[in-house]
Amino acid sequence: KYPDAEDIDILSLLTTLRRMLDEEDDEEILGFTCWALSHLCDGPAYHIYAVIYETDWMTAPLPPAGTRPIAPQDGVIPRLIELLLHPSPKVAKPALRTIGNCVCAECTTPESINLSERIMPVVDYTEVVLDYDAVPRLRELIDHEHREIQKEACWTLSNIAAGTPSQIQAVIDSGAIPPLVNLVNNENTDKEVRSEACWVVLNATSCGNDEQIDILINEGCVSVLGVLLTEASMVMMALEGLERVLQMEGNRDTNDADNGEEGSGHQTIVKCAELIQSVIKSPHHSSAVLKRAKRVWGTHIVACALCEKYYSARLLETHWCSECKCHVCRHCNCAVYHLSYQEELWAEDEDKQEAKKNAKKSKKAKKKEKEKAKKEKKRLETQQQAAAKPNKPRNAASSKNAKTKDEDGKSGSNSNESAGKAMSSSRGSIDDDTDYGMDGGDAVQDEVEISSGQPPIDLVSYLQQTGSIIALAKLMDSLYENEGSDIDEVANEQSTVDVKQRALATQ
Protein backbone atom coordinates (compact mmCIF):
# COMPACT_ATOMS: atom_id res chain seq x y z
CA LYS A 1 0.00 0.00 0.00
CA TYR A 2 2.96 2.27 0.52
CA PRO A 3 5.22 2.82 -2.51
CA ASP A 4 8.08 3.76 -0.22
CA ALA A 5 7.31 1.53 2.76
CA GLU A 6 10.96 1.46 3.79
CA ASP A 7 10.86 5.21 4.38
CA ILE A 8 8.22 4.98 7.14
CA ASP A 9 9.57 5.26 10.66
CA ILE A 10 7.48 2.34 11.91
CA LEU A 11 8.87 2.32 15.42
CA SER A 12 8.09 6.00 16.04
CA LEU A 13 4.60 5.48 14.67
CA LEU A 14 4.04 2.43 16.84
CA THR A 15 5.07 4.31 19.97
CA THR A 16 2.35 6.90 19.39
CA LEU A 17 -0.27 4.31 18.44
CA ARG A 18 0.46 2.19 21.48
CA ARG A 19 0.16 5.18 23.83
CA MET A 20 -3.19 6.06 22.31
CA LEU A 21 -4.44 2.51 22.76
CA ASP A 22 -3.44 2.43 26.42
CA GLU A 23 -4.48 5.89 27.56
CA GLU A 24 -7.52 6.84 25.53
CA ASP A 25 -11.07 5.64 26.23
CA ASP A 26 -12.70 7.66 23.50
CA GLU A 27 -14.41 5.36 20.99
CA GLU A 28 -13.44 7.50 18.03
CA ILE A 29 -9.76 7.68 18.94
CA LEU A 30 -9.60 3.95 19.71
CA GLY A 31 -11.36 3.18 16.47
CA PHE A 32 -9.03 5.27 14.28
CA THR A 33 -5.99 3.91 16.11
CA CYS A 34 -7.09 0.33 15.44
CA TRP A 35 -7.72 1.14 11.79
CA ALA A 36 -4.19 2.55 11.50
CA LEU A 37 -2.75 -0.65 12.97
CA SER A 38 -4.89 -2.78 10.65
CA HIS A 39 -3.48 -0.95 7.62
CA LEU A 40 0.05 -1.43 8.90
CA CYS A 41 -0.56 -5.17 9.31
CA ASP A 42 -1.93 -5.26 5.78
CA GLY A 43 1.45 -4.12 4.48
CA PRO A 44 4.85 -5.80 4.26
CA ALA A 45 5.75 -8.68 6.56
CA TYR A 46 8.27 -6.64 8.52
CA HIS A 47 5.51 -4.16 9.38
CA ILE A 48 3.58 -7.00 11.00
CA TYR A 49 6.77 -8.05 12.75
CA ALA A 50 7.23 -4.53 14.08
CA VAL A 51 3.61 -4.28 15.25
CA ILE A 52 3.83 -7.61 17.09
CA TYR A 53 7.32 -7.33 18.58
CA GLU A 54 7.53 -3.49 18.71
CA THR A 55 11.06 -3.61 17.42
CA ASP A 56 12.93 -3.44 14.18
CA TRP A 57 13.90 -6.88 13.05
CA MET A 58 17.04 -5.39 11.56
CA THR A 59 18.35 -4.41 14.98
CA ALA A 60 16.61 -6.92 17.28
CA PRO A 61 18.64 -9.79 18.63
CA LEU A 62 18.06 -13.03 16.79
CA PRO A 63 16.27 -15.82 18.72
CA PRO A 64 17.95 -19.20 19.19
CA ALA A 65 17.84 -21.54 16.24
CA GLY A 66 14.53 -23.36 15.91
CA THR A 67 12.64 -20.85 18.08
CA ARG A 68 10.61 -17.73 17.38
CA PRO A 69 10.80 -14.34 19.06
CA ILE A 70 8.55 -13.79 22.06
CA ALA A 71 6.10 -10.91 21.83
CA PRO A 72 6.00 -8.55 24.81
CA GLN A 73 3.22 -9.19 27.26
CA ASP A 74 2.29 -5.53 27.33
CA GLY A 75 2.51 -5.02 23.57
CA VAL A 76 -0.02 -4.02 20.95
CA ILE A 77 -1.40 -7.52 20.26
CA PRO A 78 -2.62 -8.22 23.82
CA ARG A 79 -4.36 -4.84 23.89
CA LEU A 80 -6.03 -5.43 20.52
CA ILE A 81 -7.31 -8.81 21.73
CA GLU A 82 -8.86 -7.07 24.75
CA LEU A 83 -10.60 -4.60 22.46
CA LEU A 84 -12.27 -7.43 20.53
CA LEU A 85 -15.00 -7.46 23.15
CA HIS A 86 -15.39 -3.68 23.27
CA PRO A 87 -19.11 -2.75 23.41
CA SER A 88 -18.80 -0.34 20.50
CA PRO A 89 -18.63 -1.89 17.02
CA LYS A 90 -16.57 1.14 15.95
CA VAL A 91 -13.75 -0.18 18.11
CA ALA A 92 -14.32 -3.92 17.98
CA LYS A 93 -14.45 -4.09 14.19
CA PRO A 94 -11.04 -2.45 13.40
CA ALA A 95 -9.41 -4.34 16.29
CA LEU A 96 -10.81 -7.56 14.82
CA ARG A 97 -9.58 -6.60 11.36
CA THR A 98 -6.05 -6.03 12.70
CA ILE A 99 -5.97 -9.46 14.34
CA GLY A 100 -7.35 -10.98 11.13
CA ASN A 101 -4.60 -9.36 9.04
CA CYS A 102 -1.96 -10.76 11.38
CA VAL A 103 -3.46 -14.25 11.21
CA CYS A 104 -3.84 -14.35 7.43
CA ALA A 105 -0.26 -13.17 6.85
CA GLU A 106 2.00 -15.87 5.49
CA CYS A 107 4.71 -17.27 7.71
CA THR A 108 8.05 -15.66 7.01
CA THR A 109 10.87 -17.93 5.90
CA PRO A 110 14.60 -17.32 5.50
CA GLU A 111 14.03 -16.96 1.78
CA SER A 112 11.05 -14.61 2.03
CA ILE A 113 12.87 -11.51 3.21
CA ASN A 114 16.56 -10.87 2.91
CA LEU A 115 17.32 -7.19 3.19
CA SER A 116 21.04 -6.37 3.11
CA GLU A 117 22.79 -9.31 4.71
CA ARG A 118 20.41 -9.94 7.61
CA ILE A 119 17.70 -12.59 7.35
CA MET A 120 14.34 -12.04 9.04
CA PRO A 121 13.50 -14.67 11.68
CA VAL A 122 10.95 -17.38 10.83
CA VAL A 123 7.65 -16.38 12.43
CA ASP A 124 4.15 -17.87 12.30
CA TYR A 125 2.03 -14.89 13.28
CA THR A 126 -1.01 -17.08 13.97
CA GLU A 127 0.88 -18.72 16.81
CA VAL A 128 1.57 -15.31 18.34
CA VAL A 129 -2.15 -14.47 18.29
CA LEU A 130 -3.02 -17.86 19.81
CA ASP A 131 -0.56 -17.27 22.63
CA TYR A 132 -2.84 -14.51 23.92
CA ASP A 133 -6.06 -16.56 23.83
CA ALA A 134 -7.62 -14.79 20.90
CA VAL A 135 -9.69 -17.80 19.76
CA PRO A 136 -12.11 -17.88 22.75
CA ARG A 137 -12.90 -14.21 22.14
CA LEU A 138 -13.41 -14.87 18.47
CA ARG A 139 -15.81 -17.63 19.46
CA GLU A 140 -17.90 -15.09 21.38
CA LEU A 141 -18.05 -12.79 18.36
CA ILE A 142 -19.68 -15.52 16.24
CA ASP A 143 -23.00 -14.73 17.93
CA HIS A 144 -22.51 -10.96 17.81
CA GLU A 145 -25.56 -8.97 16.76
CA HIS A 146 -23.56 -6.89 14.30
CA ARG A 147 -23.34 -8.58 10.90
CA GLU A 148 -19.93 -7.15 9.98
CA ILE A 149 -18.38 -8.33 13.24
CA GLN A 150 -19.85 -11.81 12.72
CA LYS A 151 -18.36 -11.91 9.24
CA GLU A 152 -14.90 -10.68 10.39
CA ALA A 153 -14.83 -13.21 13.26
CA CYS A 154 -15.64 -16.11 10.95
CA TRP A 155 -13.07 -14.89 8.44
CA THR A 156 -10.36 -14.77 11.12
CA LEU A 157 -11.29 -18.25 12.41
CA SER A 158 -11.21 -19.63 8.87
CA ASN A 159 -7.59 -18.47 8.51
CA ILE A 160 -6.68 -20.07 11.83
CA ALA A 161 -8.45 -23.31 10.80
CA ALA A 162 -6.33 -23.41 7.64
CA GLY A 163 -3.18 -23.74 9.73
CA THR A 164 -1.49 -26.53 11.62
CA PRO A 165 -3.28 -29.30 13.54
CA SER A 166 -2.53 -27.51 16.82
CA GLN A 167 -4.17 -24.35 15.51
CA ILE A 168 -7.19 -26.32 14.30
CA GLN A 169 -7.37 -27.94 17.71
CA ALA A 170 -7.51 -24.50 19.30
CA VAL A 171 -10.58 -23.69 17.20
CA ILE A 172 -12.22 -27.00 18.13
CA ASP A 173 -11.42 -26.60 21.83
CA SER A 174 -12.97 -23.14 21.86
CA GLY A 175 -16.35 -24.67 20.99
CA ALA A 176 -16.65 -22.61 17.82
CA ILE A 177 -17.74 -25.45 15.51
CA PRO A 178 -21.34 -26.02 16.76
CA PRO A 179 -22.40 -22.35 16.49
CA LEU A 180 -20.77 -22.15 13.07
CA VAL A 181 -22.75 -25.20 11.92
CA ASN A 182 -25.92 -23.56 13.24
CA LEU A 183 -25.16 -20.41 11.29
CA VAL A 184 -24.73 -22.40 8.10
CA ASN A 185 -27.91 -24.44 8.56
CA ASN A 186 -29.98 -21.37 9.47
CA GLU A 187 -31.69 -20.03 6.36
CA ASN A 188 -32.00 -16.58 7.94
CA THR A 189 -28.23 -16.15 8.26
CA ASP A 190 -26.67 -13.45 6.14
CA LYS A 191 -25.22 -14.85 2.94
CA GLU A 192 -21.71 -13.47 3.50
CA VAL A 193 -21.63 -14.59 7.14
CA ARG A 194 -22.80 -18.01 6.07
CA SER A 195 -20.08 -18.26 3.44
CA GLU A 196 -17.32 -17.38 5.94
CA ALA A 197 -18.71 -19.89 8.45
CA CYS A 198 -18.56 -22.58 5.77
CA TRP A 199 -14.93 -21.74 5.15
CA VAL A 200 -14.05 -22.37 8.80
CA VAL A 201 -15.50 -25.89 8.70
CA LEU A 202 -14.11 -26.59 5.23
CA ASN A 203 -10.56 -25.57 6.16
CA ALA A 204 -10.67 -27.56 9.40
CA THR A 205 -11.92 -30.62 7.52
CA SER A 206 -9.33 -30.35 4.76
CA CYS A 207 -6.33 -29.68 7.03
CA GLY A 208 -7.19 -31.57 10.24
CA ASN A 209 -6.00 -35.00 11.29
CA ASP A 210 -8.24 -38.05 11.64
CA GLU A 211 -9.10 -37.41 15.29
CA GLN A 212 -10.05 -33.82 14.56
CA ILE A 213 -12.14 -34.79 11.53
CA ASP A 214 -13.92 -37.35 13.69
CA ILE A 215 -14.86 -34.55 16.09
CA LEU A 216 -15.96 -32.35 13.21
CA ILE A 217 -18.17 -35.13 11.83
CA ASN A 218 -19.84 -35.57 15.20
CA GLU A 219 -20.46 -31.82 15.34
CA GLY A 220 -22.14 -31.74 11.92
CA CYS A 221 -19.48 -30.76 9.40
CA VAL A 222 -20.92 -33.04 6.69
CA SER A 223 -24.09 -30.96 6.51
CA VAL A 224 -21.96 -27.85 6.02
CA LEU A 225 -20.13 -29.49 3.13
CA GLY A 226 -23.50 -30.33 1.63
CA VAL A 227 -24.44 -26.64 1.71
CA LEU A 228 -21.20 -25.76 -0.06
CA LEU A 229 -22.06 -28.20 -2.87
CA THR A 230 -24.97 -25.94 -3.81
CA GLU A 231 -22.63 -23.03 -4.55
CA ALA A 232 -20.99 -23.26 -7.94
CA SER A 233 -17.79 -21.57 -6.79
CA MET A 234 -17.38 -23.90 -3.79
CA VAL A 235 -18.17 -27.31 -5.26
CA MET A 236 -14.57 -28.35 -5.81
CA MET A 237 -13.55 -27.35 -2.28
CA ALA A 238 -16.56 -29.17 -0.84
CA LEU A 239 -15.63 -32.32 -2.76
CA GLU A 240 -12.15 -32.06 -1.31
CA GLY A 241 -13.61 -31.90 2.19
CA LEU A 242 -15.89 -34.87 1.53
CA GLU A 243 -12.98 -36.88 0.21
CA ARG A 244 -11.03 -36.15 3.38
CA VAL A 245 -13.97 -37.29 5.49
CA LEU A 246 -14.26 -40.51 3.49
CA GLN A 247 -10.55 -41.16 3.90
CA MET A 248 -10.82 -40.81 7.66
CA GLU A 249 -13.90 -43.03 7.89
CA GLY A 250 -12.23 -45.64 5.72
CA ASN A 251 -9.16 -45.66 7.96
CA ARG A 252 -11.25 -45.98 11.10
CA ASP A 253 -13.42 -48.77 9.72
CA THR A 254 -10.32 -50.62 8.57
CA ASN A 255 -8.85 -50.41 12.07
CA ASP A 256 -12.13 -51.59 13.58
CA ALA A 257 -12.21 -54.55 11.20
CA ASP A 258 -8.65 -55.48 12.10
CA ASN A 259 -9.66 -55.48 15.77
CA GLY A 260 -12.70 -57.63 15.07
CA GLU A 261 -15.12 -54.77 15.65
CA GLU A 262 -17.92 -53.54 13.46
CA GLY A 263 -17.28 -50.29 11.61
CA SER A 264 -19.01 -47.25 13.11
CA GLY A 265 -18.70 -44.87 10.16
CA HIS A 266 -21.39 -46.34 7.93
CA GLN A 267 -23.87 -43.50 8.44
CA THR A 268 -21.28 -40.87 7.58
CA ILE A 269 -20.28 -42.75 4.45
CA VAL A 270 -23.92 -42.94 3.40
CA LYS A 271 -24.37 -39.17 3.84
CA CYS A 272 -21.22 -38.39 1.87
CA ALA A 273 -22.22 -40.84 -0.85
CA GLU A 274 -25.64 -39.21 -1.22
CA LEU A 275 -24.04 -35.77 -1.53
CA ILE A 276 -21.57 -36.94 -4.16
CA GLN A 277 -24.36 -38.67 -6.07
CA SER A 278 -26.28 -35.38 -6.14
CA VAL A 279 -23.28 -33.77 -7.83
CA ILE A 280 -22.90 -36.60 -10.36
CA LYS A 281 -26.58 -36.56 -11.31
CA SER A 282 -26.82 -32.77 -11.55
CA PRO A 283 -26.76 -31.46 -15.13
CA HIS A 284 -25.50 -28.02 -14.10
CA HIS A 285 -21.91 -28.82 -13.15
CA SER A 286 -18.88 -28.54 -15.38
CA SER A 287 -16.98 -31.52 -16.73
CA ALA A 288 -14.13 -30.88 -14.27
CA VAL A 289 -16.53 -31.06 -11.32
CA LEU A 290 -18.13 -34.25 -12.62
CA LYS A 291 -14.75 -35.82 -13.19
CA ARG A 292 -13.64 -35.00 -9.65
CA ALA A 293 -16.89 -36.29 -8.16
CA LYS A 294 -16.66 -39.57 -10.07
CA ARG A 295 -13.06 -40.02 -9.02
CA VAL A 296 -13.96 -39.55 -5.35
CA TRP A 297 -16.86 -41.98 -5.78
CA GLY A 298 -14.79 -44.66 -7.48
CA THR A 299 -11.99 -44.38 -4.93
CA HIS A 300 -13.92 -44.41 -1.67
CA ILE A 301 -17.48 -45.68 -2.21
CA VAL A 302 -19.04 -48.92 -3.40
CA ALA A 303 -22.78 -49.36 -3.96
CA CYS A 304 -24.49 -52.74 -3.72
CA ALA A 305 -26.37 -53.40 -6.95
CA LEU A 306 -29.19 -55.23 -5.14
CA CYS A 307 -30.02 -53.26 -2.00
CA GLU A 308 -28.46 -50.01 -3.36
CA LYS A 309 -26.74 -49.29 -0.04
CA TYR A 310 -23.39 -47.51 0.11
CA TYR A 311 -20.24 -48.93 1.69
CA SER A 312 -16.62 -47.94 2.05
CA ALA A 313 -14.49 -49.33 -0.75
CA ARG A 314 -11.76 -50.18 1.76
CA LEU A 315 -13.89 -52.63 3.73
CA LEU A 316 -14.79 -56.21 2.88
CA GLU A 317 -18.50 -55.41 3.04
CA THR A 318 -18.89 -56.04 -0.69
CA HIS A 319 -17.48 -58.33 -3.33
CA TRP A 320 -17.34 -58.25 -7.11
CA CYS A 321 -19.54 -60.87 -8.82
CA SER A 322 -17.97 -61.89 -12.11
CA GLU A 323 -21.22 -63.34 -13.45
CA CYS A 324 -23.45 -60.40 -12.52
CA LYS A 325 -20.70 -57.86 -13.29
CA CYS A 326 -21.49 -55.73 -10.23
CA HIS A 327 -20.71 -55.21 -6.55
CA VAL A 328 -22.83 -57.08 -4.02
CA CYS A 329 -22.78 -56.60 -0.25
CA ARG A 330 -22.50 -59.48 2.19
CA HIS A 331 -26.12 -59.08 3.23
CA CYS A 332 -27.43 -59.78 -0.31
CA ASN A 333 -27.28 -62.93 -2.42
CA CYS A 334 -26.93 -62.44 -6.15
CA ALA A 335 -26.91 -66.20 -6.83
CA VAL A 336 -30.64 -66.03 -7.51
CA TYR A 337 -29.85 -64.11 -10.69
CA HIS A 338 -27.28 -66.61 -11.95
CA LEU A 339 -28.19 -68.82 -14.91
CA SER A 340 -27.48 -72.04 -13.01
CA TYR A 341 -29.87 -71.04 -10.25
CA GLN A 342 -32.55 -70.08 -12.73
CA GLU A 343 -32.24 -73.49 -14.41
CA GLU A 344 -32.60 -75.27 -11.06
CA LEU A 345 -35.56 -73.08 -10.22
CA TRP A 346 -37.15 -73.88 -13.58
CA ALA A 347 -36.70 -77.64 -13.05
CA GLU A 348 -38.11 -77.42 -9.56
CA ASP A 349 -41.11 -75.49 -10.83
CA GLU A 350 -41.71 -78.10 -13.52
CA ASP A 351 -41.64 -80.86 -10.89
CA LYS A 352 -44.13 -78.96 -8.76
CA GLN A 353 -46.45 -78.47 -11.73
CA GLU A 354 -46.27 -82.16 -12.61
CA ALA A 355 -46.94 -83.21 -9.02
CA LYS A 356 -49.87 -80.82 -8.89
CA LYS A 357 -51.30 -82.24 -12.11
CA ASN A 358 -50.96 -85.83 -10.85
CA ALA A 359 -52.60 -84.91 -7.58
CA LYS A 360 -55.48 -83.36 -9.47
CA LYS A 361 -55.94 -86.46 -11.60
CA SER A 362 -55.85 -88.71 -8.55
CA LYS A 363 -58.44 -86.54 -6.87
CA LYS A 364 -60.75 -86.76 -9.87
CA ALA A 365 -60.35 -90.56 -10.02
CA LYS A 366 -61.20 -90.90 -6.33
CA LYS A 367 -64.23 -88.69 -6.82
CA LYS A 368 -65.45 -90.84 -9.72
CA GLU A 369 -64.99 -94.04 -7.71
CA LYS A 370 -66.90 -92.52 -4.83
CA GLU A 371 -69.78 -91.48 -7.10
CA LYS A 372 -69.84 -94.94 -8.71
CA ALA A 373 -69.99 -96.64 -5.35
CA LYS A 374 -72.76 -94.31 -4.28
CA LYS A 375 -74.82 -95.10 -7.39
CA GLU A 376 -74.31 -98.82 -6.90
CA LYS A 377 -75.42 -98.56 -3.31
CA LYS A 378 -78.51 -96.64 -4.34
CA ARG A 379 -79.35 -99.23 -7.01
CA LEU A 380 -79.11 -102.08 -4.51
CA GLU A 381 -81.32 -100.25 -2.08
CA THR A 382 -83.92 -99.72 -4.82
CA GLN A 383 -83.88 -103.42 -5.70
CA GLN A 384 -84.31 -104.40 -2.07
CA GLN A 385 -87.28 -102.07 -1.69
CA ALA A 386 -88.89 -103.46 -4.89
CA ALA A 387 -88.43 -107.06 -3.67
CA ALA A 388 -90.01 -106.28 -0.31
CA LYS A 389 -93.23 -104.79 -1.93
CA PRO A 390 -94.04 -106.81 -5.15
CA ASN A 391 -97.95 -106.77 -5.19
CA LYS A 392 -98.72 -103.32 -3.95
CA PRO A 393 -100.66 -100.98 -6.29
CA ARG A 394 -98.55 -98.37 -8.00
CA ASN A 395 -100.45 -95.34 -6.76
CA ALA A 396 -103.78 -94.22 -5.38
CA ALA A 397 -104.59 -92.04 -8.36
CA SER A 398 -104.63 -95.02 -10.77
CA SER A 399 -106.96 -97.00 -8.45
CA LYS A 400 -109.36 -94.06 -8.29
CA ASN A 401 -109.43 -93.75 -12.08
CA ALA A 402 -110.02 -97.51 -12.41
CA LYS A 403 -112.98 -97.34 -9.98
CA THR A 404 -114.51 -94.50 -11.94
CA LYS A 405 -114.02 -96.45 -15.16
CA ASP A 406 -115.66 -99.55 -13.65
CA GLU A 407 -118.72 -97.56 -12.74
CA ASP A 408 -118.87 -96.18 -16.25
CA GLY A 409 -118.53 -99.74 -17.59
CA LYS A 410 -121.48 -100.95 -15.53
CA SER A 411 -123.72 -98.16 -16.81
CA GLY A 412 -122.58 -98.94 -20.31
CA SER A 413 -123.38 -102.59 -19.79
CA ASN A 414 -126.98 -101.86 -18.95
CA SER A 415 -127.38 -99.83 -22.08
CA ASN A 416 -125.70 -102.52 -24.15
CA GLU A 417 -128.07 -105.15 -22.77
CA SER A 418 -131.09 -103.20 -23.90
CA ALA A 419 -129.41 -102.60 -27.25
CA GLY A 420 -128.72 -106.31 -27.54
CA LYS A 421 -132.34 -107.20 -26.88
CA ALA A 422 -133.40 -104.89 -29.65
CA MET A 423 -130.90 -106.45 -32.04
CA SER A 424 -132.07 -110.02 -31.23
CA SER A 425 -135.72 -109.16 -31.79
CA SER A 426 -135.02 -107.73 -35.26
CA ARG A 427 -132.38 -110.20 -36.50
CA GLY A 428 -133.30 -113.22 -34.59
CA SER A 429 -132.22 -114.75 -31.43
CA ILE A 430 -128.57 -115.16 -30.77
CA ASP A 431 -127.39 -118.22 -29.00
CA ASP A 432 -126.18 -117.31 -25.55
CA ASP A 433 -123.75 -120.18 -25.78
CA THR A 434 -121.91 -118.67 -28.75
CA ASP A 435 -118.20 -119.38 -28.42
CA TYR A 436 -116.08 -116.17 -28.10
CA GLY A 437 -113.01 -118.14 -27.58
CA MET A 438 -113.96 -119.33 -24.09
CA ASP A 439 -114.37 -122.99 -23.02
CA GLY A 440 -117.99 -124.36 -22.56
CA GLY A 441 -119.45 -121.05 -21.63
CA ASP A 442 -117.45 -121.15 -18.43
CA ALA A 443 -115.42 -118.20 -19.53
CA VAL A 444 -112.51 -117.23 -17.44
CA GLN A 445 -113.14 -113.78 -16.15
CA ASP A 446 -109.97 -111.80 -16.21
CA GLU A 447 -110.01 -109.25 -13.51
CA VAL A 448 -107.81 -106.19 -13.61
CA GLU A 449 -107.25 -104.28 -10.41
CA ILE A 450 -106.88 -100.57 -10.91
CA SER A 451 -104.28 -98.88 -8.73
CA SER A 452 -106.76 -96.23 -7.67
CA GLY A 453 -108.43 -98.65 -5.24
CA GLN A 454 -111.74 -99.15 -7.25
CA PRO A 455 -113.31 -102.68 -7.79
CA PRO A 456 -111.69 -104.84 -10.53
CA ILE A 457 -113.01 -104.68 -14.13
CA ASP A 458 -114.30 -107.86 -15.87
CA LEU A 459 -112.63 -107.62 -19.27
CA VAL A 460 -114.78 -110.41 -20.81
CA SER A 461 -117.99 -108.72 -19.76
CA TYR A 462 -116.61 -105.43 -21.03
CA LEU A 463 -115.87 -107.06 -24.41
CA GLN A 464 -119.35 -108.60 -24.58
CA GLN A 465 -120.95 -105.35 -23.68
CA THR A 466 -118.99 -103.15 -26.09
CA GLY A 467 -118.39 -105.64 -28.88
CA SER A 468 -115.21 -103.71 -29.74
CA ILE A 469 -111.75 -105.24 -29.49
CA ILE A 470 -110.20 -101.78 -30.03
CA ALA A 471 -112.03 -100.36 -27.03
CA LEU A 472 -110.86 -103.31 -24.91
CA ALA A 473 -107.24 -102.86 -26.02
CA LYS A 474 -107.27 -99.18 -25.24
CA LEU A 475 -108.79 -99.87 -21.84
CA MET A 476 -106.08 -102.38 -21.04
CA ASP A 477 -103.35 -99.93 -22.16
CA SER A 478 -104.77 -97.25 -19.94
CA LEU A 479 -104.96 -99.61 -16.99
CA TYR A 480 -101.42 -100.94 -17.29
CA GLU A 481 -99.73 -97.68 -18.28
CA ASN A 482 -101.43 -95.70 -15.55
CA GLU A 483 -102.61 -92.98 -17.86
CA GLY A 484 -105.89 -91.41 -16.88
CA SER A 485 -106.28 -89.69 -20.20
CA ASP A 486 -106.42 -93.03 -22.03
CA ILE A 487 -109.24 -94.21 -19.72
CA ASP A 488 -111.24 -91.14 -20.70
CA GLU A 489 -110.57 -91.90 -24.35
CA VAL A 490 -111.82 -95.47 -23.87
CA ALA A 491 -114.97 -94.13 -22.25
CA ASN A 492 -115.53 -91.84 -25.22
CA GLU A 493 -114.98 -94.76 -27.57
CA GLN A 494 -117.52 -96.78 -25.57
CA SER A 495 -120.05 -93.98 -25.93
CA THR A 496 -119.40 -93.92 -29.67
CA VAL A 497 -120.00 -97.68 -29.85
CA ASP A 498 -123.23 -97.30 -27.88
CA VAL A 499 -124.47 -94.69 -30.34
CA LYS A 500 -123.64 -96.95 -33.26
CA GLN A 501 -125.43 -99.91 -31.67
CA ARG A 502 -128.49 -97.81 -31.06
CA ALA A 503 -128.47 -96.73 -34.67
CA LEU A 504 -128.29 -100.37 -35.81
CA ALA A 505 -131.09 -101.35 -33.47
CA THR A 506 -133.23 -98.62 -34.85
CA GLN A 507 -132.70 -99.88 -38.38
Image (cartoon, rainbow, N blue to C red):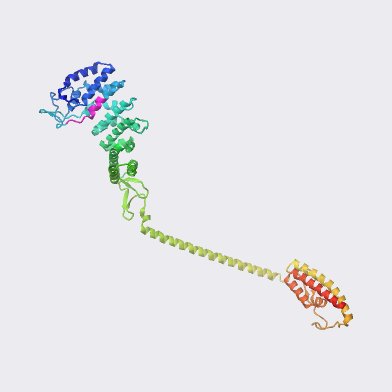
State the predominant SS element of the stretch in magenta: helix
321 on left or right of 496: left
Q: 368 or 81, which lies in front?
A: 81
Which of the 4 image quadrants contains residue 478?
bottom right
Identify the image quadrant of the N terminus: top left
Count of numbered circles in the view: 0
271 on left or right of 167: right
225 on left or right of 37: right
Identify the image quadrant of the C terminus: bottom right
Q: Is residue 100 covered in magenta?
A: yes
Relative to 264, say whether 416 is above or below. below
Q: Is residue 35 visible?
A: yes
At which x and y percent is residue 397?
75, 66
Q: Residue furthest right?
A: 425
Q: 351 or 263, which lies in front?
A: 351
Q: Residue at x 41, y 60 (%)?
A: 346
Q: 437 or 218, which lies in front?
A: 437
Q: What span is colored magenta in the figure?
A: 97-108
At which x and y percent is residue 70?
18, 25
Q: Residue furthest front?
A: 3
Q: Residue at x 88, y 78 (%)?
A: 422
Which of the 4 image quadrants contains residue 505?
bottom right
At which x and y percent is residue 39?
22, 24
Q: Is residue 130 visible?
A: no
Q: Is residue 229 covered in magenta?
A: no
Which of the 4 image quadrants contains residue 194?
top left
Relative to 89, say whether 326 is above or below. below
At which x and y percent is residue 52?
20, 24
